[in-house]
Image (cartoon, grey):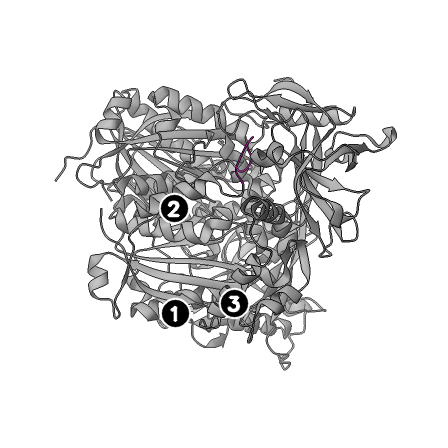
C-alpha cells in the first residue's frame, strides 16, 4: 500500500543498577580474583556458572566449589562479524564450555585466532582474564585454546580475595525505527501546517484526535478527516510540582486536558501565560504555535496553550468529558 | 466448576531497595514463604502463574523465562500475565481460574517489581516518536482525574488525606509493608510536598522492590491446609477503552460492572 | 489435559493478516481490528456476544510499554468486556482463554496477537530475555544461541550443512496479527460446521541455564505433548513453530512425528509473538475445512526453545465420561 507516513529512530537505553544477591555476587567476586567457581546441588551436581536455585528442585543451591580453570567446548557457533559489544574484536566463537569439575556448561566467547577452522567441539580451553576487572562475567575476557594459553600466559595463583560483588551495572541499548501509521501521519502532517485534523467515526459520529483505524467503541475506522479548531476548553488539569528529568519547564507548571472545539475527546498539553494556581476547569484556551520555521509533523508544533480571554465554559459543557 | 482455596501467602519485605537479592532472589523469597505458610514444597506445585507490569522496569523481557528455576517451574506450566496496573489482581485471578477450571490442583502465583534497578518515572514516560508523552509518570496522568473526581463528587479537600492516613495506619500491622510511618496523621500528610497537584507525597505509593506470592489449591489441597483456607467466592475483570469520546474517567463503567459482577 | 464433561472447547474460526515484511501503515489497534472482525465474521459471532477476550503481545518488540492497552481499541471493548493479556505468544493467550472457558460461565472467547518485529533488531530484542547477570552483558543474541543448538545437533549426527545454513541466513522478520474464536459445546457446533475441538493443550518450560540443558532434544515439548495427549494417534497434519531448520528436526523428534504419515508443512516466517497462535489457527483451519481429522500445533518461546506449548485438535470432540 502506498504510504508516505513518518518514521523516526528511537533508542531505548538505560543502565540498570542490579543487585546480585549472595550466589551471583560471590561468583562475580571470584571472577574479579581470576577464579572460577560452581555450586553444588543437593544431588551432588555442580552448576557453573552458579545458578541460584537447583533447576531440578527449586531449592537453594549449596556450597561454592572451585572449578576449572580449564574446560572443554561442548558446542559452538562462529561469529564472522563481531559487534562492538562483543567480548572479542576479531572473528570468534560463542561456545558452551564445561569447566573441569562442573556438570553444566558456561556460555562465553572463545578466541581461536580468528580462524573458524580452529574451533571444534571437544577443544580444551582455558580462561583469558582482562587486565582490569570489575566483578562481571566480562572479567573473563574469553576462553582460548588450552595449549596456546599454557605457552603464552603465566598462570598466576589466585591469591586475591576481593569479596563478593553486590551491585552490577547493566546497560541496555536497543534501536528502533518507529513508524507512524497512516492515520497518525495524517494528523501529524496537518500539525505541520498549523491545522488540527481528527477523524470522525461513521457509527458514533465522534471526532477523534488523531484519526484512528479503529474507533474504540464501534470497531470501525474513525477516519473521516475532520478539522477542529485550535482553541478549546480545559476539562481537567494538574499542577506538577515535582522536578524530574524530562520536565519541559522547571516546576511548578500546569498540564491540561483540552477539549478543542469540534473534537469529542481532549488532548493533553501544557498551559502558560497564567499562574498555575489560576488554571481552572472550564478555562478557555487557544494554541500558541511555534514560529513557522519550527513547524513540523509533531504535537510539539503547538508550543503550549494560553488563556484565550473568553469567559469560562460552564461545568455542564465539559462534565461529559471527565 | 471447582472451588479454589488460598492455603498459603508470602511476601518479601517491601523496601525502596532490596539490594541484598537478585531479581530471582526476590521472587523466590516470597514464593518460599508462601509454600512454608502452606506447609508445602516446590514439588507439590503443579503450575506457576507470575504477573508483572512493564518489563522495562527491570529490563528483563519475558522474565518468566529467566525466573523458571527460581520458582521451581522447570518441567511445569508457567504463564506470565501482564495487564498493566491491575496485574497483581489479574495474575491471582488467572491462577485461581486454573484451579476452578480443574486444569491444575495446586498453583503458585507470584507478582513482583524490582523498581530500584531503574527509575519508574523513566520507564513509564519514554520519549517515543509520534506518541503523546505522559507529562510526568503515573502521578501526572492520574492527578487530573483526581481533580475531576473532587469536582464532580464535591469531595472535601482532605478526603485523599484521610485515605492516606487510613492506609498507612493499616500498614503498621504488616511487618512487610514498605511504609510504616509511626504517628502518621492528617497533618503529616497535608504538610508533605505537593507533587502533582492535588496529589501530595504521602498520598502516593512509593517506588518499591517487593514480591508477593500465594498458593492456591482445590478442595483436596484445602483439606490439608494447616490453617483454615480462604475460599475464593468471586472473581471478575472488566476492561474498556482507555480513551474514548465521552468516557467517564472518574467512575468508569468497567469498574462498576466489575464490582457488580464479582458480587453476583 | 482434556476437556471436562460437557465443556468440549473448539476453535471455530481463524483469521490472519497477509504476511508483511514491514507494515508501515498501521498502529497496533489497526492490526488487531481487521483480524478480529474477520474471525468474528467467519464464526458468525457478534462482538457483543463474546464472553472473554485474551491477547498476546510484547512491549519490547514494539518499543513501548503498555502497547497492548492501545491495541485493545481494535476489539472495541464497549460496553466493558472480560479481558486479559499475557506478555507471551498468542498461543499462551489461547491457553488462558481455554482455561477461562472451562470455568463454565461463558461460552465464547476471542484470542488475538499482534507484533511488529520490523521496528527493532529482533535478535537483539530477544536477547533481553536472557539472564541479566551471566548472559546479557556478553552481547550474545538470539540467532547466535540458535547456532549453538544447531551445532549441537550436528555433533549428534542429526543435522548437517543445511541446518547450519538456515541459522546463518538469520530468522526472517515480519509484522502482523492473527485472531481465533473459541466456543464451547453446542455453541461451537452452531458457529462452525466442523469445529476443531481442543482435545488437549499443555505447555512446559525448561531451565533457563543453557549449559544445563540437552540442546539436542526438546524435553519440554515432549512433556507438553504427553500431557496434551498427543501420542497414541498420529496427526494428519502438524504445524511446528520453528524459526530454523534444526529446530524442526528437534521438534519432530520430541513429538514423535513421522513425515510419512503426518503432513508437516515447512514453517513460515510468521511475526514474533503471533507465530505460535498462527500455528494453532492454521492447524484448526485444516479441520474446519475438512482436510484433516486430527491436527497438532506447537508454539515456542525463549532461547533455544526453552518453553513449548502443544495442542491437539480433532474433528470429533472427546466422548464425555
Residue under numbered circle 3: B168
| Residue B259, disc | 2
Label 2: chain letter: B
- Residues C46 and C228: in front is C46
In the rendered image, residue B244 lying in the magenta stretch gets the answer yes
The alpha-carbon separation of the residues under discs 3 and 1 comes to 24 Å
Principal SS element in the magenta part? loop
Q: Is residue A224 above or below residue B154?
A: above
Q: Position of residue A213 (x, y in %)?
A: 56, 24
Would you identify the image quadrant in which residue A187 lies?
top right
Q: Which residues are magenta?
A: B242-249
Q: Position of residue B217 (x, y in %)?
A: 27, 58
The residue positioned 51% from the left and 19% from the top of the image is A203
Label 1: chain letter: B
Which quadrant does the N terminus of chain A fall into? top right
Mark 1 / mark 2, whichever is N-terminal: 1
The residue positioned 57% from the left and 27% from the top of the image is C21
The alpha-carbon separation of the residues under discs 3 and 2 comes to 25 Å
Label 3: chain letter: B
Q: Is residue C103 above or below residue B227?
A: above
| Residue C28, disc | none
Amino acid at each position: 500500500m502506498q504510504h508516505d507516513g513518518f518514521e523516526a529512530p528511537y533508542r531505548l537505553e538505560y543502565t540498570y543498577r542490579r543487585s546480585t544477591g549472595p550466589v551471583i555476587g560471590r561468583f562475580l567476586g571470584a571472577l574479579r580474583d581470576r577464579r572460577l567457581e560452581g555450586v553444588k546441588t543437593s544431588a551432588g551436581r555442580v552448576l557453573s556458572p552458579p545458578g541460584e536455585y537447583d533447576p531440578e528442585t527449586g531449592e537453594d543451591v549449596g556450597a561454592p566449589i572451585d572449578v576449572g580453570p580449564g574446560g572443554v567446548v561442548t558446542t559452538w557457533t562462529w561469529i564472522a562479524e563481531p559487534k562492538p559489544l562483543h567480548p572479542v574484536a576479531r572473528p570468534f566463537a560463542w561456545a558452551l564450555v564445561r569447566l573441569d569439575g562442573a556438570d553444566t556448561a558456561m556460555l562465553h566467547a572463545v578466541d581461536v585466532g580468528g580462524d573458524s577452522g580452529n574451533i571444534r567441539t571437544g577443544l580444551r580451553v582455558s580462561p583469558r582474564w582482562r587486565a582490569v576487572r570489575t566483578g562481571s562475567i566480562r572479567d573473563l575476557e574469553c576462553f582460548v585454546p588450552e595449549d596456546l594459553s599454557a605457552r603464552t600466559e603465566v598462570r598466576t595463583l589466585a591469591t586475591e580475595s576481593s569479596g563478593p560483588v553486590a551491585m552490577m551495572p547493566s546497560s541496555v541499548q536497543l534501536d528502533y525505527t518507529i513508524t507512524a501509521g497512516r492515520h497518525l501521519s495524517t494528523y501529524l502532517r496537518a500539525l505541520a501546517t498549523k491545522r488540527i485534523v481528527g477523524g470522525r467515526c461513521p457509527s458514533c459520529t465522534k471526532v477523534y484526535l488523531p484519526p484512528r483505524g479503529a474507533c474504540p467503541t464501534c470497531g470501525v475506522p474513525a477516519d473521516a478527516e475532520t478539522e477542529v479548531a485550535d482553541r478549546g476548553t480545559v476539562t481537567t488539569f494538574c499542577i506538577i510540582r515535582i522536578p524530574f528529568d524530562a520536565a519541559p519547564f522547571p516546576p511548578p507548571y500546569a498540564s491540561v486536558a483540552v477539549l478543542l472545539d469540534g473534537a469529542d475527546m481532549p488532548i493533553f498539553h501544557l498551559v502558560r501565560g497564567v499562574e498555575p494556581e489560576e488554571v481552572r476547569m472550564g478555562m478557555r484556551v487557544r494554541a500558541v504555535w511555534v514560529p513557522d520555521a519550527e513547524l513540523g509533523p509533531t504535537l510539539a508544533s503547538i508550543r503550549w496553550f494560553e488563556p484565550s480571554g473568553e469567559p469560562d465554559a460552564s461545568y455542564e459543557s465539559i462534565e461529559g468529558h471527565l | 466448576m471447582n472451588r479454589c482455596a488460598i492455603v498459603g501467602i508470602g511476601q518479601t519485605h517491601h523496601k525502596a531497595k532490596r539490594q541484598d537479592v537478585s531479581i530471582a532472589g526476590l521472587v523466590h523469597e516470597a514464593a518460599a514463604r508462601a509454600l512454608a505458610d502452606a506447609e508445602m514444597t516446590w514439588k507439590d506445585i503443579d503450575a506457576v502463574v507470575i504477573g508483572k507490569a512493564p518489563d522495562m522496569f527491570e529490563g528483563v523481557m519475558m522474565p518468566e523465562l529467566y525466573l523458571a528455576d527460581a520458582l521451581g517451574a522447570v518441567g511445569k506450566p508457567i504463564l506470565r500475565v501482564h495487564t498493566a496496573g491491575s496485574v497483581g489482581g489479574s495474575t491471582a485471578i488467572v491462577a485461581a481460574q486454573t484451579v476452578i477450571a480443574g486444569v491444575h490442583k495446586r498453583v503458585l502465583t507470584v507478582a513482583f517489581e524490582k523498581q530500584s534497578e531503574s527509575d519508574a518515572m523513566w520507564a513509564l514516560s519514554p520519549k517515543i516518536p509520534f506518541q503523546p508523552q505522559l507529562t510526568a509518570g503515573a502521578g501526572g496522568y492520574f492527578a487530573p482525574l483526581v481533580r475531576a473526581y473532587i469536582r464532580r463528587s464535591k469531595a472535601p479537600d482532605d478526603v485523599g488525606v484521610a485515605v492516606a492516613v487510613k492506609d498507612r495506619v493499616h500498614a503498621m500491622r504488616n511487618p512487610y509493608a514498605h511504609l510504616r510511618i509511626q504517628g502518621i496523621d492528617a497533618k503529616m500528610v497535608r504538610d508533605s510536598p505537593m507533587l502533582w497537584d492535588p496529589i501530595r507525597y504521602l498520598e502516593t505509593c512509593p517506588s518499591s522492590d517487593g514480591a508477593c506470592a500465594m498458593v492456591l489449591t482445590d478442595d483436596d489441597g484445602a483439606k490439608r491446609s494447616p490453617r483454615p483456607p480462604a475460599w475464593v467466592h468471586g472473581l471478575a475483570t472488566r476492561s474498556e477503552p482507555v480513551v474514548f469520546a465521552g468516557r467517564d474517567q472518574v467512575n468508569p463503567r468497567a469498574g462498576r460492572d466489575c464490582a457488580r459482577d464479582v458480587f453476583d | 489435559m482434556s476437556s471436562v464433561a460437557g465443556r468440549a472447547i473448539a476453535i471455530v474460526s481463524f483469521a490472519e493478516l497477509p504476511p508483511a515484511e514491514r507494515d508501515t501503515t498501521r498502529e497496533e489497534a489497526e492490526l488487531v481490528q481487521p483480524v478480529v472482525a474477520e474471525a468474528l465474521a467467519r464464526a458468525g459471532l457478534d462482538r457483543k456476544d463474546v464472553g472473554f477476550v485474551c491477547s498476546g503481545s510484547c512491549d519490547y518488540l514494539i518499543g513501548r510499554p503498555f502497547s497492548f492497552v492501545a491495541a485493545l481499541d481494535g476489539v472495541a471493548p464497549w460496553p466493558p468486556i472480560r479481558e486479559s493479556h499475557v506478555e507471551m505468544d498468542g498461543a499462551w493467550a489461547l491457553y488462558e482463554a481455554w482455561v477461562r472457558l472451562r470455568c463454565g460461565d461463558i461460552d465464547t472467547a476471542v484470542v488475538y496477537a499482534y507484533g511488529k518485529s520490523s521496528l527493532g533488531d529482533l535478535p537483539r530484542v530477544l536477547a533481553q530475555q536472557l539472564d541479566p547477570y551471566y548472559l546479557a552483558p556478553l552481547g550474545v543474541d538470539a540467532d547466535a544461541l540458535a547456532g549453538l543448538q544447531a551445532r549441537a545437533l550436528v555433533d549428534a549426527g542429526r543435522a548437517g550443512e543445511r541446518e547450519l545454513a538456515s541459522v546463518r541466513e538469520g530468522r526472517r522478520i515480519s509484522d502482523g496479527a492473527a485472531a481465533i474464536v473459541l466456543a464451547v459445546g453446542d455453541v461451537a457446533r452452531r458457529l462452525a460446521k466442523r469445529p476443531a475441538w481442543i482435545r488437549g493443550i499443555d505447555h512446559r518450560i525448561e531451565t533457563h541455564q543453557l549449559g544445563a540443558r540437552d540442546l539436542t532434544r526438546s524435553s519440554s515439548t515432549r512433556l507438553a505433548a504427553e500431557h496434551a495427549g498427543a501420542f497414541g494417534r498420529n496427526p494428519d497434519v502438524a504445524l511446528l513453530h520453528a524459526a530454523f531448520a534444526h529446530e524442526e528436526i528437534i521438534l519432530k523428534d520430541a513429538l514423535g512425528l513421522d513425515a510419512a504419515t503426518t503432513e508437516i508443512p515447512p514453517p513460515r516466517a510468521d511475526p514474533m509473538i503471533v507465530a505460535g497462535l498462527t500455528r494453532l489457527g492454521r492447524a484448526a483451519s485444516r479441520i474446519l475445512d475438512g482436510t484433516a481429522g486430527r491436527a497438532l500445533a506447537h508454539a515456542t518461546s525463549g532461547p533455544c526453545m526453552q518453553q513449548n506449548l502443544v495442542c491437539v485438535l480433532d474433528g470429533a470432540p472427546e466422548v464425555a465420561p
